[in-house]
Image: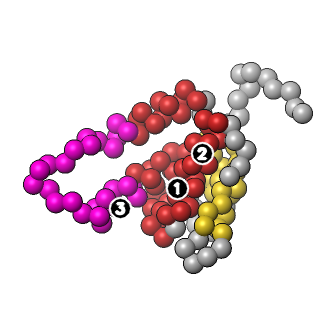
Amino acid sequence: MSKIKLGDRPKSFKRIVKFPRIEGGEGAIECTFKYRTRKEFGEFLDRMVEAAGPKTKPDDEKFSMASLFEKTGGQNAQYIMDVLDAWNLDVDLSLSAVEQLSNEYPGAASAIMEAYRMAIVEGRLGN
């Protein structure tokens, strides 16, 4: 067991994030996450919610699932960009690559976000 030292926080930490693939089987991505304290994570979430804008829409605007998926996919991609330092995919970590991942493998995006939340809030080691 290693001794902990308060105030000696890591810059980042790694996790293997596993997710179900739509065609069957399991996918995995090694993610290097940015370290945040619980308080910093709360402040980060506050900024994300504020950036998402108002929760209401104009009365004359029609509901569209495509628009909803596009908006949430973009927000999820930005969230992932803000929590990752690196990943082990064959493409560089970029907003467009994360948007493509979120579109093609929505389970991967959800798993990355949940793995980060669990690590920061609950200190869990894995999935």
Asked if the magenta segment contains residue 38, the reply would be no
Mark 2 and mark 3 residues within 8 Å of each other at the beta carbon: no
Q: Earlier in the sequence, mark 2 or mark 3?
A: 3
Q: Residue at x 48, y 70 (%)?
A: 104
The residues tagged by marks 1 and 3 sit, at their Cα atoms, a distance apart of: 13 Å
Which residue lies under the disc numbered 3?
69
Q: Is residue 65 left or right of residue 120?
A: left
Measure the alpha-carbon separation of dots 1 and 2.
Answer: 10 Å
Q: Position of residue 70 (x, y in %)?
A: 34, 61
Q: Residue reaching furthest bottom? A: 23
Q: Is residue 53 magenta?
A: yes
SS at badge 1: helix
Identify the amino acid type marked 1.
Ser
Provide the residue span drawn in magenta.
Answer: 49-74
Q: Residues within 10 Å of mark 1 (few under 14, many from 20)?
A: some
Q: Earlier in the sequence, mark 1 or mark 3?
A: 3
Q: Position of residue 33 (x, y in %)?
A: 63, 46
Q: How many marks?
A: 3
Please give the label number shown on residue 116: 2
Tell me if I can see residue 75 in this picture.
yes
**Residue 97 can be seen, yes or no:** no
Query: Circle 1 sits on which residue?
Result: 110
Q: Amino acid at mark 3?
A: Phe
Residue 47 % position (x, y): 41, 35
> Splitting the image into 4 quarters, where does residue 96 fall?
bottom left
